[in-house]
Amino acid sequence: MVQHTIAVVNVTLIQGDQVFLIQENKPGVRGKWNFPGGRIEAGEDIADAAWREVKEETGYSVRLTSTTGVYPFISDTGSRIVLFHFNGVVTGGSFRPAEGEVQDGKWVTLAELETMDDADLREPSILRNIIDHMKNDELYPVDLYAGLKPEVS
């Protein structure tokens, strides 16, 4: 039997030597830190979904600058996930956590993020994989996904 796949995006907001994390407020992941992101809506371009999710969860406008790739995994809740990850910079707005979805947000260095306990992170192995790609400068152009609209249900 083919398991349902969920297409999601997340974005590492970069400011100097720091990245922005949100503290989740959703059942099952409440209190865990993650990059802003969420599900891609039906018919939505992947990059547009990334921009929308950052705006919804943080209040920030963002310019996507690169991607580190695609990360398929089985989530802590048992769902099959395909994650499209982007890097970006804040171009406007101020931090306003999405009511009911985000408890808090903070800027941390990659070194600080690397020392955070796995129990405090949402999908820690994926976050650490993304960090490794960033540190090794394994970055690709955003237009790699131009016009790509995954089939979602």
Image (cartoon, helix red, strand yellow):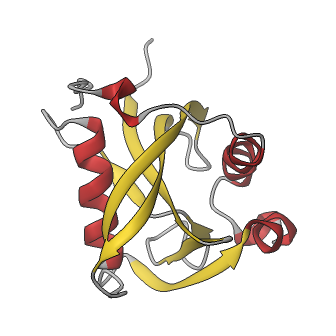
In this rendering, is residue 51 above or below 56? above
Residue at the limit of the structure toward the right, as seen here: 115
Quarter occupied by residue 122: bottom right
Q: Is residue 41 left or right of residue 3?
A: left
Image quadrant where one finds the N terminus: top left
Quarter occupied by residue 73: top right
In this rendering, is residue 73 above or below 64? above
Image quadrant where one finds the C terminus: top left
* Residue 56, percent from left and from top: 26, 70
Q: Which residue does the image show at 75% across and 50% down from the upper left?
A: 128
* Residue 79, percent from left and from top: 49, 38
Front position in the image: 118 or 77: 118
Q: Is residue 126 left or right of residue 77?
A: right
Q: How many marks?
A: 0
In this rendering, is residue 36 above or below 9? below
Front position in the image: 34 or 89: 89
Q: Which residue does the image show at 57% across and 33% down from the upper left?
A: 71
Front position in the image: 92 or 121: 92
* Residue 50, percent from left and from top: 33, 51
